Amino acid sequence: MAKRESSFVNMVVTLLVITSVASFLLATVYNFTKEPIALAREAMRMEAIAQVVPAFDRLESKRFQSYDGGDSLQFNFAYSGEELVGVAVETYTTSGWSGLITAMVGFLPDGRIVDVVHLHHRETPGLGDKIEKAKSDWSNQFRGIDPRTTDLRVTQDGGDIDAITAATITARAYTEAIQRAFNTLEENFLNEQEGLTQ
Amino acid sequence: MKQLQNFTKGIIKENPVYILLLGLCPALGVTTSAINGLGMGIATTFVLLGSNIVVSLIKDLIPAKVRIPSFIVIIASFVTIVQLTMEAYLPDLFASLGLFIPLIVVNCLVLGRAEAFASKNTTLSSIIDALGMGLGFALALVLLGGLREILGSYSLFGYKFIPGDGMLVFVLAPGAFIGMAYLIVLFNYLKKKTS
């Protein structure tokens, strides 16, 4: 086979052409898939919101800084007509077994938890992934609890939440993420609301 | 006949994972369940097919000294295309596999076939080689993933047949090595028997 000689000019030109064609191709694909990707992500977020707050017909999103000064959390206020029916908080923790875990926590306007679903995690399959609703009903224990009266820590740490067998670190992290959502909600919303009614 | 052999060699005789021992990183990493193995196998087959076709088409235009960087750019482009397309149109599959897609770039199977086969053969042979190797790789991953899922979670393709948690070691990394070792033994036995 007649290969081209490995002269300096040949090599530079070949690499230049290949990388240019590759970047052009990738840019095209990126532009083409940008919208569907954004839509798919938005659909996943909406699905998660719908799972954790009562039926609503209007959403208002606003970002608040986490109570401890960390990254801001997105609050999705769900309205049915003019009445606020719930708040879905997109929360996170970085202390999972494999780092970042994000979750959507739904609260009633009085601060009680409706439900919690995970959005993204990289926990160990078969152990830590029991935080997923599809894998285990473990996360159902958060339904209906009031974080002001329930100690949001795993039982090993003296709290009221049952940990996952062989995945205590994941359970602890997930619980911490929920606590973060509640504390931020309390600071930015519940306290203000009390101020209004008093 | 020769092309048929070219296609079937990837299944047992030159199975990429168990005989050639290529692409072990994704083979050990993603095979916690059979469905993960299947998804990774299909994604890799697509990349393999694309890179083999392009490499066999432009093999005469690439100077020998820069062939490896050229191949890597081609492979990485295909991987990114797979990643973007999957996230856009198959978000559910992407949610479980997305993390592993960039790993295909460093899969020595893809570069290995580009270097060892596509750069020396015709486009048709390269397509058949890619399909055969991809099938062998997917089969290998489904086997290992299925084995680990059955023993580790008592389920297969997500269908649970015995209640309970299973042997956790098979879900974790050591189980991948144990399962792979036994499958390497099995495939070498099969290879000896068929040849």
Image (cartoon, coloured by chain):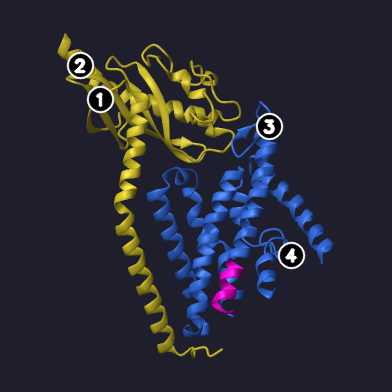
Q: Which structural element holds mark 3?
A: loop
Could you tell whether B65 is left or right of A8 in the image? right
Q: Which structural element holds mark 2?
A: helix
**Other residues around mark 2 within 10 Å, as few (<14) / some (14–19) / many (≥20):** few
Position in image of residue B135 (x %, y %):
62, 59
Q: Earlier in the sequence, mark 1 or mark 2?
A: 1
Could you give the CA–CA distance between mark 2 and mark 3, rounded to whole angstroms?
49 Å
Residue B112 appears anywhere in the view: no
**Other residues around mark 1 within 10 Å, as few (<14) / some (14–19) / many (≥20):** many
Residue A151 vs residue A118, the one in the foreground: A118
Q: Which marked residue is nearer to the observer: mark 3 or mark 4? A: 4
Q: Earlier in the sequence, mark 3 or mark 4?
A: 4
Could you tell whether A54 is left or right of A99 in the image? left
Q: Which marked residue is nearer to the observer: mark 1 or mark 2? A: 1
Which chain is home to disc 4?
B
At horizontal 47% and vertical 75% (from top left) the residue drawn is B70
Q: Amino acid at mark 3?
A: Gly
Position in image of residue B178 (x %, y %):
73, 47
At horizontal 52% and vertical 59% (from top left) the residue drawn is B104
Residue topped by disc 1: A78
At horizontal 49% and vertical 91% (from top left) the residue drawn is A5
Q: In the rendered image, which quarter contains the C terminus of chain A?
A: top left
Could you give the CA–CA distance between mark 4 and mark 2, rounded to whole angstroms?
71 Å
Residue topped by disc 4: B13
Do discs 4 and 2 belong to a common subunit? no
Q: Which residues are magenta?
A: B121-130
Which mark, residue A189?
A: none
Q: Amino acid at mark 1?
A: Ala
Residue topped by disc 2: A193
